[in-house]
Each structure stands twice: as C-alpha cells, then as structure tokens.
Image (tube, rainbow, N blue to C red):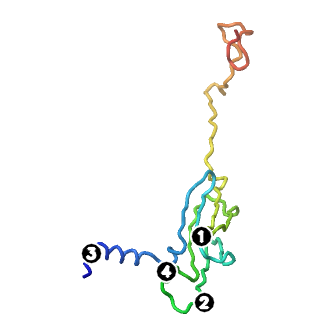
Amino acid sequence: MARFDPFRDLDRLMSETLRTPASAAMQMDLFRRGEAFVARVDLPGVDPSSVDVDIEDRTLTVRAERRDEEDVEQWLSHERPSGTFARQLTLGYGVALDRIEADYTDGVLTLTIPVAEEAKPRKIQVAHRSTEGDVRGEVTARSDQAPDQVTQSGRQDG
C-alpha cells in the first residue's frame, strides 16, 4: 500500500516544473577572480564543434548541441536532455567585450570576461593647496634651525 506524502509529491512536482531542459543541460558557475569574471558552463557529452559563443548588444549567448543516440531499439531510461540548448548572460558596461576568451575542456566551457580598464578601481591623488599658494611636502629650512641641519625631505640630520 502506497502512502500519500504531500511534501514529497509537492517537491517532485516543483522540481519537474522549474527544471527546464536548457537549465538542466547548461548549469553554470559565475564568479570574479582578480580583474576578470569567470563563467563555467557544464556541457558534458556535447560535440565541441557545436559550441557557439557570440555577443550582440551586450548579450552573450552560449549555444551547444547534444545529439540523441540514433541506434537505440528501446529506451529503459532517458534522463539526459538532447537537442540544441542556449543560455544568455546580459553583460554590464564595465567589461571588455573585445577581450573575452572561451575554452572548452573536459565538458566544461570556461568564459573569461575581463573588467574594462575604465571600470577598474583606481586611486586619485589629491592636490593640497592653501590660499597662499601650493603646499609642498618638503621643508627647506626652519627658522629655529640652521639651514645645514635639515635635508631635502624635511628630516633632521644627526
């Protein structure tokens, strides 16, 4: 006698409903490493010649095809999705679209998306001024010391 378990049935229904063939076939990790974003897309069993990566208007699209077995008499279990799959990423304005690299090794497509030079954080040097003119970081002589006791950097000798 089978017992009714509403939580198990709801979990099964939700996982079947929310899992689309494209998301199941193209699982992805996305992270930042130094001055680049890295996307790793799992594409096991995909013919490398079918992998296509293109960019149009800041949208990066990955397409790949996994062909179905042709000489099967009867499927006993058929869980691996087949066909053409696509996944899109919308890229922000802080990445260098002309320097994106793609590598497909051992069933994993790795996309390296560099941060654009203009988007990299940088330090801005602040100039210090007074109403009497520029203030410099050097001391040439102080009135309470002889001129030969002070070096160019402002430190006392001896």
**Residue count near mark 1 (Cα–Cα under 10 Å), binned few <14, some 14–19, many ≥20:** few
Judging from the image, what secondary structure is the residue with disc 3 in? loop
**Residue count near mark 2 (Cα–Cα under 10 Å), binned few <14, some 14–19, many ≥20:** few
Report the disc number at residue 79: 4
Residue at the image position 62 percent from the left and 31 percent from the top:
128
Question: Is the C-beta separation of discs 1 and 2 under 8 Å?
Answer: no
Report the disc number at residue 70: 2
Please report whichever mark, 3 or 1, sits nearer to the chain's N-terminal start: 3
**Residue at label 1?**
59
**Residue at label 3?**
5
From mark 4 to mark 3, how far is it between C-alphas?
A: 24 Å
Please report whichever mark, 1 or 2, sits nearer to the chain's N-terminal start: 1
The image quadrant that residue 7 belongs to is: bottom left
Vertical placement of 124 versus 87: above or below?
above
Amino acid type, mark 2:
Glu
Please report whichever mark, 2 or 4, sits nearer to the chain's N-terminal start: 2
Q: Position of residue 25 (x, y in %)?
A: 53, 75
